[in-house]
Image (cartoon, helix red, strand yellow):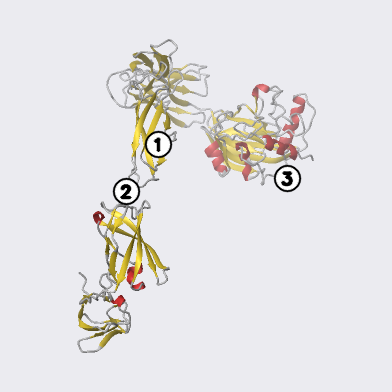
Amino acid sequence: MIQRIAPYFIMLLVSNASFGQVDVDSNYSLDQYVNDILLGEGVEAFNVSYTGGASQLGYMTGGEGNLMISNGLVLSSDAADNISCPPIQNGCTDCLGMDFNDPDLLTIANSVPPLIGQNFSVSSVNDGCVLEFDFTASGDSISFNYIFGSDEYETWINTQYNDVFAFFLSGPGIAGEFDSPAGFPDGAINIAGVPDSDPYLPITISSVNSGTNAQYYVNNQSEQDICILGYTQSFTAEAAVQCGQTYHIKLAIADGSDTALESVVVLEEGSFSSNAFDLTATASISGNIIFGGDTTVVESCNDAIFQVVRPDASIEDTLIITIGGTATNGVDYELIDPEIIMEAGEYSVDIPLNVNPDVEAEGTETVTIEYLYVNLCGDSVLRQSTLLIEDFEPTELDFANPVGICNGEAVLEVTPVSGYGPHAYEWSTGPNDTLSVNIIQTDDPGAAIVTVTDVCGNQVDATISYTLPPNLFVYAQQLNTPLCAGDDIVLESGITTGVGPFSYDWSSGGNSANETVNVTSSQIITLTVTDACGIEDAFEVDVEVPVYDPITGEDEELCLGIQGDLNLLGGTGQEIAGNWVGDYTFYVWQYYNYDSQGFAQDSNWVAVDAALDTLVTFIGPSGNFQASIEQNSMEVTVVDQCGLQATFEINVVACDTEIPNVFSPNSDGTNDFFRIPGIEGFPNSRLEIYNRWGSVVFQDQDYKGGWDGRINGTPVSDGSYFYVLYRSDGERFHGAVTITRERR
């Protein structure tokens, strides 16, 4: 057997990459496919069975567009979702392949060639997809709508690759040449064929294409919206049945002679139905559906009808209908006679609903018609339809009085915000001004009148004034203040009048609405703006860059271990941790500690503040700068935020000790240690501390730091203790120190 794989892949390579909105879902049950998707009114189905792969059957949505069927049941000789243009078509993995056998389908496929004057034959049918069920009908006929499509088009028409489908119907009153299941002894007929063909011509790629029965064919070689190379117009399959009797239908499709290139049948959702009495209600005007839907009537606007349809028109029939709803018959609408006469030969009759206009706001009212009838099976069936009556909503307009665009043009626009569209527009500016947006030529102020007409024929006028464009006026402002020369500043433009779009030209080089400039000195920056009419306006921004006094101060003498002060003036401010603190000036100190050979030993950056440019507290590295140096001179370099700096000489000398008499070792960060400021100037000094009973609780032969109020790691009790300091210069000091851990 010849496998036509190569052409299949060629088709994929050249297919259109623009996918449609078609979607196919193969995750429904057999009962859902039949009863929830396929069946319409007047038919009950049971004993549903299926032969084929699960992926060959699916529910299609989104077929509107090229397809004449929006939603429906798909039967395919390949994966059903291939019709939805997946990015990669991998084929059907669960199809029956070469194992499928159906003599009736094969017979139908080979019946086509002689009927169309051709001489080819189909050797086998493969990849079958067969859906079957029993049903009863409440009328004397059944019908459903369908289309056939195939990727065999048009390369393989009139060849052995003649994919085939059929709808085999069997049951009471039907005798046919095709096989029928048990309980239906008289055989089956195929109800899928070319309309009005004689003899009856089954539908295949060879019987409906661009050369044969072309009126029924759609060429889709570019695969627009759906991925089927060709498909038929929508056909209707129909047959006479006996009301209430059980029938069987077999819906089948298969590949002819091979397993390549899929064919599909799409059965329209809800179309499998039996003729029956029907009662519907519709409202429209001039082909336009009113805002509330096709069952809404608007006072002073549109009319509506109730339509009665019956299956048999052979006799005259009198229908007695019940009229209800919140609207009053003969008051809110013209009187409707509850007795309807349907003449012989008349299959339908229209009952008009002509609404009487009034000026009262009554809200939504309803008109309901009911009819109880007996169908052909003897069943009583209630039919009901309802129409809504809405109060008339007049058209209101939204518009603005524009200024004229340059060169004498003005744009006039009006927008309906209520009423019933689409609206028609008539402008006083000329017979051709029929759109909602109009351009007129003018050099002087003026006005135009627009008449807006809704679909109901009601009119409303609006007068729109227009003026000449104003002169251009621009301004600019500086959004931030530079701290130092070389800082960025941001300039913002503003336009109060003029006609956009606008172009910008900053003397600093920018061409956008806002400008960022790096300034090194005070200067004037000019903004020039040009509007759409070529009008220019300029604005100057005076950018001031502050100039700071140099940093000044005096050389100081500091005691070892004791904090000192350095008085500074001048310099600039600095932002600390993202915040400005008051009106303080901030300094960054860089400390240089030199040893006896003149080498820098310690260097640290510390931010400190001076309130009102007066006082700076000297802070050493690691919390106690003096502890790391000997008596010596050092330099302190003060650097401000803008890089101004000054250097001062600090003489560090040993000063007399100042022994505190109280400390609080409670770990609150304040006075936690017994420290002796200035002791750093007297190395190798011995400190002893006694309790009231004369026991030593602390001693240090080279006291430099502080006692934390502990003895062997255990805190001593609060109270008074006695110290003896043997300073290294021979001086002896003694006294009392109090420990209190109370937090204040």
Judge from the rendering whether residue 266 lies leftward or rightward of residue 392; answer left or right.
right
Q: Secondary structure at mark 3?
A: helix
Amino acid under disc 1? Asn
> Which residue is situated farthest in the bottom direction here?
694
Residue most toward the top? 431
Which of discs 1 and 2 lies nearer the camera? The answer is 2
Tell me if 736 is positioned left or right of 556 in this view: left
**Earlier-in-chain disc, 1 versus 3:** 3
Residue receiving disc 2: 548
Disc 3 to disc 2, how far (Cα)?
98 Å
Residue type at numbered disc 3: Asp
* Residue matched to label 1: 514
Residue 56: percent from left, percent from top: 63, 41
Residue pointed to by mark 3: 99
Using the numbered discs, state the Cα–Cα distance from disc 1 to disc 3 in whole angstroms: 76 Å
Query: Residue at point 67% right, 39% down?
Result: 77
Classify 287 as above or below 241: above
